[in-house]
Amino acid sequence: MAAQSPLIEMPLFPLASVLFPGGQLQLRIFEPRYLDLVRECSRYGTGFGVCLILEGQEVGAPAIPAAIGTIARITDFHRGEDGLLGIVAEGGPRFRVARSRVRSDGLLRGDAEVWPAEPEEVVPVEFALLQSILERLIETMAPQWRHAPRSAYDDASWVGFRLAELLPLDASEQQHMLELNDPVQRLAELRDILPRFQKP
């Protein structure tokens, strides 16, 4: 049996949406606990954990987050016209929270096991339709991916994660896609969901 990865401690940011590895997250920060989180991550060059909210809200009392999430690293800052701090973060590895606690300021912190990256697998030929659909979605909805190398479209993990964030899945379906550990199984499940989105 493989040895368990050591736990790392990090601040958690529960959100009403799922962040996937390689995905981009834009946030407006105004609560003091999250301003502290941004300061900490900037000072130490560390990331924070993004987890889907299972119960509660993004603001106010601490929400109950899903155990499996994605580490986000801040890549850019800006100050909005409303004076609020805006950040752009990129999704890194996934993790599973072993235990969590709420600090006195309401910030959630967790001890988490970081998951290794998925093995690289080429998209099997039977999923070529998914590659075409992803190209169309990126053209209309996701300009940040328009210059992705052609090789990205051959990577089963990349294609699956990008489709899971761009297709109109509900949050629980996105969370399920995040938690799957087999990139080809993820593609198969996404293919099976597609008929739902086709116009009659």
Image (spheres, rainbow, N blue to C red):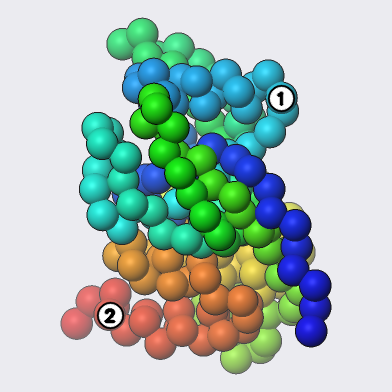
Residue to which mark 1 is pinned: 44
Q: 43 above or below 98? A: above
At 31% from the left and 46% from the top, the residue drawn is 63
Most extreme residue toward the bottom, as rendered?
A: 126
Identify which amino acid the numbered label 2 is placed on: Arg
Q: Position of residue 132 (x, y in %)?
A: 54, 72
At 57% from the left and 19% from the top, the residue drawn is 39
The image quadrant where one finds the N terminus is bottom right
Q: Nearer the viewer, residue 96 or 196?
A: 96
Identify which amino acid the numbered label 1 is placed on: Tyr
Residue to which mark 2 is pinned: 196
Q: Position of residue 78 (x, y in %)?
A: 50, 16
Q: Quadrant of residue 15?
A: top left
The image quadrant where one finds the C terminus is bottom left
Q: Nearer the viewer, residue 193 or 85?
A: 85
At 42% from the left and 66% from the top, the residue drawn is 175
Give neighbour class at mark 2: few <14, some 14-19, many 20+ (Cα, 10 Å).
Answer: few
Q: Relative to 180, is 81 on the left or the right?
A: left
Marks 1/2: CA–CA distance:
45 Å
Assign a secondary structure to mark 2: helix
**Disc with the residue nearer the chain's start (1 vs 2):** 1
Q: Relative to 8, is 100 on the left or the right?
A: left
Please say whether residue 153 is visible from this viewpoint.
Answer: no
Q: Position of residue 194 (x, y in %)?
A: 37, 80
Please say whether residue 180 is visible from this viewpoint.
Answer: yes
User: Do the numbered discs 1 and 2 sit on residues whose CB atoms are within 8 Å?
Assistant: no
Q: Nearer the viewer, residue 98 or 193?
A: 98
Give neighbour class at mark 1: few <14, some 14-19, many 20+ (Cα, 10 Å).
Answer: few
Q: How many marks?
A: 2
Assign a secondary structure to mark 1: helix
At 46% from the left and 44% from the top, the residue drawn is 101
